[in-house]
Image: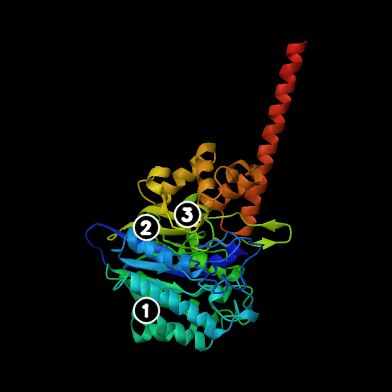
Amino acid sequence: MAAVNGWLGTLVILLIISASKAQEGYFWHITDHHYDTTYWSEMRSCNDEVPVRGIYGDYWCDSPWRLVNDSINAMASIKSNVDFIIWTGDTVAHIKDQYLNESVNLEIMKVVTDALKAAFPGVKVYATMGNHDWYPSDQFPVTSHFLYNATAELWEDWIGDAEQMANFRKGAYYTAKTAQGLRIIGLNTNLYYTSDKLTTDLTDPAGQFAWLEEVLKNAKVAGEKVRCCYPLTFLPAFTFLEMFNGWLSISTPASSTYSNNIPTSSPPCSSGTTTLTDSNYYKNGSTPGTPMFMAPSITPWRYKIPGKSGDAHNPAIRLVKYNKGSGLLLDIHQYYMDLTDSNKNNASNWTIAYKTSEAFGLSDLSADSLNGVIKKMETDKTLLDKYIKYNTVLANGEKTVNECGEKCRAIFTCGFTHMDKTSFDSCVDFRVGAATMLRSTTTFFIALATLYILM
């Protein structure tokens, strides 16, 4: 599925190394290019018939090169003087393994890497691998491999020292310090995906958890603050999820070894998905914990399975404003390309979709600020409608909003606050049941009132 594929990027953690004078900075977050080299020939990523191929792509297909390159040029045109770029993978298209191989995947990674280096000379890019970047897809090993080694060489300018290059060669994870005093920790969470047959029976694939714990332990001793940027849906094994939550003080503060290093006032950046779905972790189900932001993808590809398909969504790139001293995220500037109009006019039109400061009245993106908006969405239909409309990056106008019934809305509101499937399902069932009960009660009183009038 598209959402799952997008989330199988990586975990990126920002650690504050030293306090500095409070000042505003910016970084780009991009994800899910899914470059389809066959778009103008066999169209192997497309999920439906495409009678007329648009020059920037189609909602049923992955990205042609023109869209990939145009998105990078748009970033440079909108704001080139950024502090760094976060690139959370899934660069290879949704194409069956029989049409791919290690060399093809590597070449796709290389051309996008080269394009970013050309557009942003001197700007560090902190990149991680998505599940589709591997060959065969999803099958990340726990031993040295050609793709680990070759990708490490592609990104050597960004990763840095020899020790971190060795970590990447071992399992595609590493840490690097930015010029602004932040430490990036990139984790290869693909190792925990249930589709990875090479890690099924392993308790700590590639020794990544032990390594992460050591990094967090050192951060705690040094008084460093942790900033997280990660998806959770791709961690289906409960043991991994429970361990991860415990360490990062997401949902079990009593057992959180590093809870003091994860201030709730400093939300993380984001990891990739095909649509926009932001969440707020809650400790014990009530206290705002660590926010999570999922950036929409560059590919407009929508999944299609028997009886169901994903909504159309526009290509998007995300600019994040943050406080360099505290690491606190201040604002998200979400840009997008109207795919239909761009294809029609033979020219791209990357424009602002929204700013969180303006669209939702947020002064910053702290857990407490987001909690206020999330609580308001539970009763403010107009505010939730706005979020639902943005969820497909303005691809469907009011259609997505109008077709979103009680269960659909419950899925959104419960998704903001419930990170595990059991509690999420219970929340949805409760909200749908409450709505049904309210509707039945309202119908009863209306009938009673009508009967009274008739009498």
Regarding mark 1 in the picture, which secondary structure is present there? helix
Q: Which class describes the residues within 10 Å of circle 1: few (<14), some (14-19), or many (20+)? A: many
Q: Earlier in the sequence, mark 1 or mark 2?
A: 1
Residue 320 — which label?
2
Q: Is residue 244 left or right of residue 152?
A: right
Residue flagged by tag 2: what amino acid is it? Answer: Val
Residue 181 appearing in the image: yes
Q: Which class describes the residues within 10 Å of circle 3: few (<14), some (14-19), or many (20+)? A: few
- Label 3 belongs to which residue? 345
Residue flagged by tag 3: what amino acid is it? Answer: Asn
Residue 121 locus on image (x, y percent): 30, 73
- Label 1 belongs to which residue? 159
Q: Earlier in the sequence, mark 2 or mark 3?
A: 2
The relative height of residue 207 versus residue 45 in the rendered view (above or below) is: below
Q: Earlier in the sequence, mark 1 or mark 3?
A: 1
Q: Residue at (40%, 57%) from the top-left corner?
A: 267
Q: Residue furthest left?
A: 21
Q: Quadrant of residue 111?
A: bottom left
Q: Is residue 116 left or right of residue 442?
A: left
The CA distance from mark 1 to mark 3 is 40 Å
Residue 356 — which label?
none
Residue 13 locus on image (x, y percent): 41, 68
The answer to whether the residues at label 2 and label 3 have Cβ atoms under 8 Å apart is no
Q: Residue at (38%, 65%) from the top-left corner?
A: 73
The relative height of residue 304 versus residue 214 in the rendered view (above or below) is: above
